[in-house]
């Protein structure tokens, strides 16, 4: 992956671009037959809340004429996920963990390892904070995400439930 990529916290002025990337991901999931993100989630309010809580992160690359271009987004959470407390299965660890929600990559950047690089940068951030576990979940029919999790070394641990339904839960020791 390109060393020029910059991983940083998202800024509120980037919400429109982030939502454009989210809408692209929603359209791809719909076209692939996935039911994930087909109910208006995530909405601009989710992204604004992420940014306001210092959870929104972007991966950027230099633009052709200078400014950085946001190519991926995700919510990086270090203070837990309540749904994970009631897993139908077993986590690999009982340690503090980092998790990612709402990860999405811009259409023009797909197939270039951007999502894997985003997850790698989250791992590095977690390691810098002394966190040794990484958790994530996805819908059973999100084949792109399921392949990414397998390629990046995550282990299936069970199922978690949100208001919107059941999700497959994964963890990786880092």
Image (cartoon, helix red, strand yellow):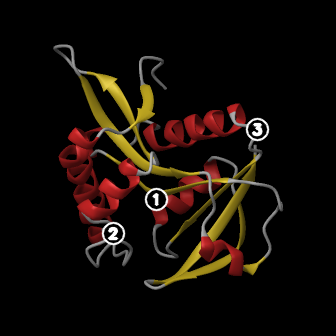
Whichever of callouts 1 and 2 sits on the residue coming sooner in the sequence is 2
Q: Is residue 48 above or below residue 38?
A: above
In percent of width and height, residue 112 lies at 41, 36
Mark 3 = which residue?
Answer: 130
Q: Is residue 104 visible?
A: no
In percent of width and height, residue 24 lies at 24, 56
In-image side of 6 versus 149 (left or right): left
Q: Residue at x 37, y 48 (%)?
A: 51
Q: Residue at x 28, y 56 (%)?
A: 22
Quadrant into which the C terminus falls: top right
Extreme-front residue of the structure = 52
Q: CA distance from mark 1 to mark 3?
A: 29 Å
Q: How would you rate the neighbour count of disc 2 (Cα within 10 Å): few for under 14, some for 14-19, many for 20 or more?
A: few
Asked if the residues shown at circle 1 and circle 2 are in contact, with their CB atoms under 8 angstroms apart, the answer is yes
Q: Is residue 85 visible?
A: yes
Element type where label 2 sits in the image: loop
Asked if the residues shown at circle 2 and circle 3 are in contact, with their CB atoms under 8 angstroms apart, the answer is no
**How many marks do you count on the picture?**
3
Q: How would you rate the neighbour count of disc 3 (Cα within 10 Å): few for under 14, some for 14-19, many for 20 or more?
A: few
In percent of width and height, residue 73 lies at 38, 46
Q: Is residue 124 above or below residue 85?
A: above
Element type where label 3 sits in the image: loop
Q: How would you rate the neighbour count of disc 1 (Cα within 10 Å): few for under 14, some for 14-19, many for 20 or more?
A: few
Mark 1 = which residue?
Answer: 144
Element type where label 1 sits in the image: helix
Q: Is residue 41 above or below residue 171?
A: below
Between 112 and 60, the one lying in front of the other is 60
Mark 2 = which residue?
Answer: 32
Which of the 4 image quarters holds residue 60?
top left
In percent of width and height, residue 5 lies at 42, 24
């Amino acid at each position: 992956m390109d060393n020029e990529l910059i991983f940083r916290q998202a800024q509120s002025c980037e919400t429109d671009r982030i939502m454009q990337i989210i809408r692209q991901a929603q359209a791809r999931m719909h076209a692939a037959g996935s039911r994930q993100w087909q109910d208006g989630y995530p909405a601009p309010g989710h992204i604004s809340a992420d940014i306001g809580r210092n959870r929104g992160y972007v991966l950027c690359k230099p633009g052709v004429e200078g400014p950085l271009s946001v190519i991926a987004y995700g919510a990086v959470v270090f203070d837990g996920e309540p749904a994970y407390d009631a897993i139908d299965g077993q986590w690999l660890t009982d340690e503090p963990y980092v998790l990612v929600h709402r990860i999405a990559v811009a259409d023009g950047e797909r197939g270039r390892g951007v999502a894997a690089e985003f997850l790698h940068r989250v791992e590095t951030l977690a390691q810098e904070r002394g966190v040794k576990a990484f958790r994530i979940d996805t819908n059973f029919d999100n084949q792109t995400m399921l392949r990414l999790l397998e390629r990046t070394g995550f282990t299936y641990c069970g199922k978690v439930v949100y208001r919107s339904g059941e999700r497959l839960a994964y963890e990786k020791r880092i």
